Amino acid sequence: MSADPNAVSTPLDSTAADPFGWLEEVEGADALAWVRERNAQTAATLGSDTGFAGLEQAILEVLDSDDRIPDVTRRGDRYYNFWRDAAHERGLWRRTTLDSYRTDAPEWETVLDLDALNAAEDASWVWHGAAALRPEPGQPWRRALVSLSPGGSDTDVTREFDLVEKRFVPAEEGGFVRPAAKGDLSWVDADTVLVGTDFGEGTMTTSGYPRTVRLWRRGTPLAEAIPVFEGEPGDVLVTGRHSRVPGFERTFVHRAITFYTSHAYLVTGLGTADQRLVRLEVPDSAEVGFHREWLLVDLREDWTVAGVEHRSGSLLAIHADDFLAGSRAFTTLFAPTATTSLAGLAWTRHHAVLNVLDDVKNRLHVLTPPADGVGEWVRSEFPAEPGVLAIGVGAVDPVESDDIWVVTTGYLTPSTLSLARVAGPGAEPGEVERLKAAPAFFDATGLVAEQRFTTSADGTRVPYFIVGDAAQLHPEPGAEPAPTLLYGYGGFEISLTPGYSGAVGRAWLARGGVYVVANIRGGGEYGPAWHQAALQENRHRAFEDFAAVATDLVTTGVTVPERLGAQGGSNGGLLMGNMLTQYPDRFGAIVVQVPLLDMKRYSHLLAGASWMAEYGDPDDPAQWEHLRTFSPYHLFDAARTYPPVLFTTSTKDDRVHPGHARKLAALMLDSGKDVTYYENIEGGHGGAATNAQAAHMAALAWSFLTQRLR
């Protein structure tokens, strides 16, 4: 089914009936017939390419490799890992000891076999994670809440799981079972959970998430869960959490009013007639949390309190009891500079490890609070790693241990996992034990990774990373321009840092391509201000930044527009849609993955309403005036020439509606443009539910880019 191309006004009239609105019916017969036809055409072109099968297999070998580093989570004396490989398509939840994990071939004990579960239940469950209940001292870790998604969607179920008997606890035995919905369960104690889920009409926000938190006691029907807090229908979501740190047990509720504003409440007398909620009086835009006796506030805007001005991007700390008593005498743990931002914070038992980005390069700093809650925090440095690398850090057990996991990775440096002991002030640095090192999945001989900077349209300095053969990055006059792929995201304060990818290496770098990652505004590379600079009516700055990087790659002789590709997904898909419609002459091919593209309809589709703080409200005529300037569906003009484009999405994506990709692809096809389309049935917003699906989707993109740019 398709519309008459002569009947489509281009650019698309936002006030007229949508000629492809029928493609928004996710499971509609006509829509799925259209999808099947497009998928078949793509299989007949990209999928039948002589090198496709080999490329797909090369990527799958990386994803299924037994030599990957198993990511583990400590629960008591066991270390848990979720693992997919060729023999376990949906995955195994398994555990081992630290001594065994240290070896080259750990002995794993299977806790839950998801493939076996799917076979037994005739289901297509995808792992969404597990939360274990910290037991009373001396007791075994026994209770967990396991979340499973049908086909990889954000919608999931939660079931109680017995870690000792390695089985689900059914509802008829008193087990906690939350039916399919967007929501979650979290432990209060062995017989009580906080629940956010769909309780029927009026209990979900317009964004499709829970707007109530309730207390659910074992042995009682879910429908009788006791209300703790109720937000407004227009909120994004409401969640509740309980901290079981001995001596510092607290329940708190988080009400997300928009994506970037919220209220946090401390709950006393939970579930009793004396239950009371105390709002934590911090700016709505701030993020707030607790660790033991400390309250921490992460600022997104400047805040003057008690006569002191604290800058946006700062991290503040105060003794929680003092704050609740009215004090606002904060200690500044981190204050940004022109080049630095806070990338993360990991608490151990006695220390806080700050992960700071300095011109998009990680540096770790250790802060030790005063033992009695009074006095100065003491700073010490963690050894820095040289080169174009990213460093991630996480606590092994923030309640009982000062150990941290340290992950180091780079575009040409396979990931390593180390175990380190955080030392206090004046103490000898703790030992750093390298536990695991991933193998090299491609030959990096002659390849280099560099960081460069260029200037955007308004004069802003924009960084980017570039990886390739040294001769390609610094070409001699007359050298052949390299096939180059430029990747970007630019939204939601998310930073893009270096990372090793065997798939990128095998499919692109080892085959003579240059790979580039742009750190454009809208991201978090330079803190909240970098993100806020491209919000709503200023969204064009993210697009200008990306286009500036594309221009710089041509100006410096790395490539030419005909050999320059661009790729991005989700918000990065919106970025790609705007590269396609606003800067078509700068690219030879574009890959658009799980994208937002119809900015007139986005807030009415699935979770779209939750992103209005990022983009704006299209139902407000004044805001639509700026939204229409970056709505690719409405910017497409049949009279213009566009580079070849590949759209990919997932039928099971219940976050970003697949109708976005479907409709622009259909509109462009009706105008005779060079469009390739593929929609995976499973996978959710991630696009794939298994390694095999992920390899197939990646191979389609790499094959498309190879065909069009070489």
Image (tube, helix red, strand yellow):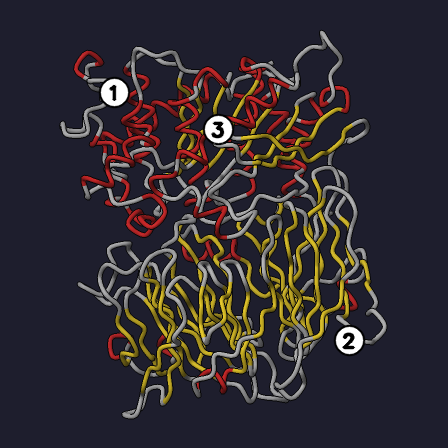
Numbered disc 1: secondary structure: loop
User: Which numbered disc flags the more N-terminal residue, 2 or 1?
Assistant: 1
Query: Gap in Å between the C-alphas at discs 2 and 1?
Result: 63 Å
Task: Choose mark 2 or mark 1, whichever is in front.
Answer: 2
- Residue 190 visible in the picture: no
678 shown above or below 188: above
Quadrant of residue 21 within the rendered picture? top left
Numbered disc 3: secondary structure: loop
374 shown above or below 642: below
Which numbered circle lies on residue 425? 2
Most foreground residue, 81 or 613: 613
Disc 2 marks a residue whose amino acid type is: Pro
Disc 3 marks a residue whose amino acid type is: Ala
Which numbered circle lies on residue 457? 3
Most foreground residue, 289 or 555: 555
User: Which numbered disc flags the more N-terminal residue, 3 or 1?
Assistant: 1
The quadrant of the rendering that contains the C terminus is top right
Residue 179 is situated, as x and y percent measured from the top left of the image, at: 33, 64
Residue drawn at x 69%, y 38% is 411
Query: Gap in Å between the C-alphas at discs 2 and 3?
Result: 46 Å
Task: Choose mark 3 or mark 1, whichever is in front.
Answer: 3
Would you say 652 lies left or right of 291 here?
left
User: Which numbered disc flags the more N-terminal residue, 2 or 3?
Assistant: 2
Numbered disc 2: secondary structure: loop
Query: Gap in Å between the C-alphas at discs 3 and 1?
Result: 25 Å
Q: Which residue is mark 1?
A: 11
649 shown above or below 177: above
- Residue 618 visible in the picture: yes
Disc 1 marks a residue whose amino acid type is: Pro
Q: Around disc 1, counting alpha carbons within 10 Å, would you say few (fewer than 14), some (14 to 19), or many (20 or more)?
A: some
Residue 113 is situated, as x and y percent measured from the top left of the image, at: 55, 59
